[in-house]
Image (spheres, coloured by chain):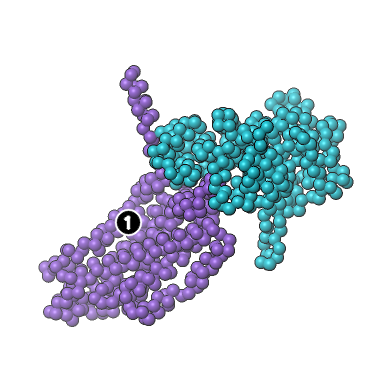
Amino acid sequence: MSAPLLQVEDLHVSFDIRREGDMPWTKPLKLHAVNGVSFTLNPGETLGIVGESGCGKSTLARALIQLVPAAGKVVWQDGTNLLGLSPHEMLKYRREVQMVFQDPLASLNPRMTVGQIIAEPLTTHHPGLSKDEVKARVQAMMEKVGLLANQINRYPHEFSGGQCQRIGIARALIVEPKLLICDEPVSALDVSIQAQVINLLMKLQRELGLAMIFIAHDLSVVKHISDRVMVLYLGRAMEIAGSADLYGKPDHPYTQALLSSVPIPDPAAERAKVTIPLDGDLPSPLAPPSGCVFRTRCLRAAPRCAADVPPLLGGNHQVACHFPGPLMAQAVPAA
Amino acid sequence: MFMKEEAAVRLADIAVKGRSPWADARARFARNKGAMVGLFVLSLICLFAAFGSHLTEFTYDYVDFGLMGEAAEKGAPSWSSGHYFGTDDGGRDFFARVVQASQISLAAGLIGSAVAVIIGTLYGAISGFVGGRTDQVMMRIVDILLSVPFMFVIILLLVMFGRSIWMLFLGIGMFSWLDMSRIVRGQTLSLKRREFIEAAHATGVSSGRIILRHIVPNLMGVVVVYASLLVPIMIMTESFISFLGLGVQAPLTSWGALLSEGASQMRYGTLWLLLFPLGFFVTTMFCMSFIGDGLRDALDPKDR
């Protein structure tokens, strides 16, 4: 087993919140968007990250490539901690880690042609390339992601959402990164286009030996593409396990609730399914519950859950819960 | 059959030319009749200012002593005398004077808004993009400058350093960029959070290049519209100061200075001294407003 490509240890991201009417000298409130997340990612592996809106998925991704300041450790393959590098030192690693964004059209500059957009990372990291070489590489990349190379002079608004996302993927892959972070790359697309884009990503991953961090709120998409899956809740990892393992026998009550909410395309099975109610909203990240953050909505909540923070334990199947275990139907109150 | 295939292959080889957002805007602008007429008339006025001096045998500072003081009797506009716009009270050919005044007034408009565009755009974009304390300081400087009554400062400048056209341009340029920088900063703040800027960051594009390649081109719509509306304001400012008698000095002149002279001699029956500069002034204002409106309609991203 080679060294992991990326090792994240105890990653924290917090934002200062100033309420209206605060004096300039009042201490701002801290919003902990990501609160002590650790995971490892091996070369060529896909890690899926799922969770509700506002649980810190996108913030986690942005922290990894330092679009938001973070604390903790993000250790690259060669042993360098990416956090705390100067922008100049970071430049070398930006080539290795690229990102695909959620909104396909918004992530492309409307005043630049597709060729200019895709070439930008290339000209940033290899300023010595000649114009012809850049153009040749851009066209090769466009064909690789399923775009016509003769559309190099078109503008983003002339493309459909799925095509725009392909442009975004081409831009990310043109510098041959080792890690691709996909922040909900398909949630803005039609279902049929989603499948195309996901299959494209999987094909490119195989060809280029990419590692991927794939963020989504669509559980079935994540199941399809990921080797391992991490479940986030309120900025904390609840469960990390192999994809089949996690979907087959989830141990954390939150994961169980999430999975039970996925509709099954079979009316009989759908009726027979036990749905675990998740009452209420996500608690405010400004004042997270003490102990286990999920206890306010958990069926198994006990006094101990309010007192201690459950650590993320286990070997290949890690769970952060005081009472992990498979779901028992009798524990679920009738809806 | 063969030929069809060949044609298809050739078609695939030709890189398709994309329609840029600028090309779209140009087409929308060309459909706007008012703006096109405005552009046409304004071009005529610019041609008049540039080449009008070749149409008359008189120069703007030539004094015909025979006509001096007798403008009302002998100086009326006429083709036969060669004084197409008549002569003024000093016996100078009014056509040549209007040509010269147009040059100064249009230059004041262009220089004022060019300074506004260049300084205002860069200042606002940097302030908005860098953000934080830098933004606060840069914008407070603008606030302080805006709170200074700028007409007063220009007049003071002209009084202290002598009345020269360059001092006037400097004074106008000093203040014209303030509003522009505020508008640009606001736009930059909203652009900064867009995903394509984040993507550029993530790739490692330097801040300077992000501002020049990603932010400024996306600001140009707002900037162009505002600049086109700024040109008449600049012409107006220059005219106002010249009307007060502080702007350009004889023998140079501008529309404002001519209007001032014409207005003071209205009672003596030399109305052409007022009407010719007034006509040029008003027509230019109208043209600029129509062009500005057309540009706004063409470039406003909201109606896309």
- Residue at image location 50% in from the left, 49% down from the top: B205
Chain B, chosen colour in render: purple
- How many dots with numbers? 1
Q: In this view, does B25 lie to the left or right of B215?
A: left
Subunit that carries the residue with mark 1: B
Front-most of residues A88 and B141: A88
Q: In this view, does A58 lie to the left or right of B264?
A: right
- Residue at image location 65% in from the left, 40% down from the top: A6
The image position of residue B179, as x and y in percent, is 47, 64
Residue B237 occupies quadrant: bottom left
> Which of the chains is cyan?
A
Task: Determine if residue A200 is in view.
Answer: no
Q: Is residue B277 left or right of residue B16?
A: left
Q: Is residue A293 left or right of residue A65?
A: right
Label 1: state its secondary structure: helix
Mark 1, Cα crowd under 10 Å, few <14 / some 14-19 / many 20+, is many
Instruction: Name the amino acid type tagged 1.
Output: Gly
* Residue B111 position (above or below residue A332): below
The image position of residue B255, as x and y in percent, is 29, 70
Residue B21 occupies quadrant: top left
* Residue A124 position (above or below residue B89): above
Q: Mark 1 points at which residue?
A: B38
- Residue at image location 78% in from the left, 46% down from the top: A293
